Image (cartoon, helix red, strand yellow):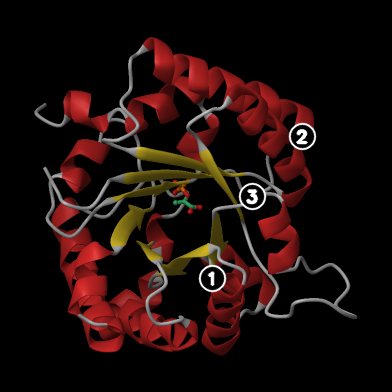
């Protein structure tokens, strides 16, 4: 058993409105509770669209559900004339524990740079929110630079914004594996996650590196999660498509039940 608590995070992307989010989170909690899931052995978080967060907060508080939630992005700025942006202060006011930063879809469709991502990591820490920093190479990067060069370089810049002593979660998400149905092999993912842990040690110190959860993301399913979780440097998963299928996501959360299969 690893010293770091495994973390299974569901990135809903632009799916499920606020009413659907309530139904989903409630059913997820029931399913896990019926299956006697021990949340001490795997932490669970969902990342709904911003417009759902207030509803999810109300449900989680009212029913005292052991499910964390987070935003899918955060502004570098705290307030002001930034139309469409969401401040870390607003996320914190909704008890948001985590925020996804630098997802490849933000990098690709919104032109987010590594420097902006570092600014967002700094903003999360200013507001006491744990950043889930996404890094990963495209298929072209993989061919040109090999497996770890790009994610390592991205993480070096992103961690420039981290406040020493504050928690971070890192998600290694090869862009070619996201939504493609073609996950990395657990060996490939382990190799990159180990290189990312070295960067964390260099920049934030050994103790932080040992305590930091590094997730793999990219076509994770209940049928491949166990292989990833057996690796020394993989502490969980950031799950996209499969996080919207209730039974499938609950089965990923309960990876310990099929880790020996
Ligand atoms: C993601 O979007 O972060 C992701 C990993 O997606 P999927 O699981 O669908 O590949």
Depth check: give the residue in front, 24 or 43: 43
Task: Using the numbered discs, state the Cα–Cα distance from disc 2 to disc 3 in whole angstroms.
Answer: 17 Å
Q: Count residues near mark 3 (Cα–Cα under 10 Å), then give few for <14, some for 14-19, many for 20+.
A: some
Dot 1: element: loop
The residue to which callout 1 is attached is 102
Mark 1 and mark 3 lie on one chain; the one further toward the N terminus is 3
Percent x, y for residue 115?
55, 89
Mark seen at residue 210: none
Dot 2: element: helix
Percent x, y for residue 232?
12, 56
The C terminus lies in which quarter of the figure?
top left
Mark 1 and mark 2 lie on one chain; the one further toward the N terminus is 2
Depth check: give the residue in front, 223 or 193: 193
The quadrant holding residue 31 is top left
Q: Residue furthest top?
A: 34
Instruction: Please tell me whether mark 2 or mark 3 is closer to you in this view.
Output: 3
Q: Count residues near mark 2 (Cα–Cα under 10 Å), then give few for <14, some for 14-19, many for 20+.
A: some
Looking at the image, residue 124 lies above or below residue 255: below
Task: Using the numbered discs, state the Cα–Cα distance from disc 1 to disc 3 in whole angstroms.
Answer: 21 Å
Dot 3: element: loop
Tell me whether circle 2 and circle 3 mark residues in contact (CB < 8 Å). Answer: no
Depth check: give the residue in front, 92 or 174: 92
The residue to which callout 3 is attached is 95
Horizontal side of residue 124 vs 139, given as left or right: right
Percent x, y for residue 108?
59, 72
The residue positioned 72% from the left and 55% from the top of the image is 93
Looking at the image, residue 33 lies above or below residue 6: above
The residue to which callout 2 is attached is 18
């Amino acid at each position: 058993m690893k010293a770091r608590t495994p973390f299974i995070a569901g990135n809903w992307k632009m799916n499920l409105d606020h009413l659907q989010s309530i139904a989903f989170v409630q059913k997820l909690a029931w399913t896990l509770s019926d299956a006697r899931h021990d949340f001490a052995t795997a932490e669970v978080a969902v990342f709904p669209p911003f417009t759902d967060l207030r509803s999810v907060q109300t449900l989680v508080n009212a029913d005292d559900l052991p499910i964390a939630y987070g935003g899918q992005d955060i502004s570098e700025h705290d307030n002001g004339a930034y139309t469409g942006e969401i401040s870390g202060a607003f996320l914190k006011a909704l008890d948001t524990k985590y925020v996804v930063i630098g997802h490849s879809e933000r990098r690709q469709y919104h032109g987010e740079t590594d420097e902006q991502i570092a600014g967002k990591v700094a903003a999360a820490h200013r507001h006491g929110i744990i950043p889930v920093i996404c890094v990963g190479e495209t298929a072209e990067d993989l061919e040109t630079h090999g497996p770890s060069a790009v994610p390592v370089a991205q993480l070096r810049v992103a961690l420039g914004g981290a406040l020493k002593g504050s928690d971070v979660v890192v998600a290694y998400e090869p862009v070619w594996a996201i939504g493609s149905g073609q996950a990395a092999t657990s060996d490939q993912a382990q190799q990159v996650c180990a290189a990312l842990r070295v960067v964390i040690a260099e920049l934030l110190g050994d103790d932080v590196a040992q305590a930091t959860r590094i997730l793999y993301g990219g076509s994770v399913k209940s049928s491949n999660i166990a292989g990833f979780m057996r690796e020394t440097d993989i502490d969980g998963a950031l799950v996209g498509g499969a996080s919207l299928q209730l039974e499938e996501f609950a089965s990923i959360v309960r990876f310990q039940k099929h880790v020996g299969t």
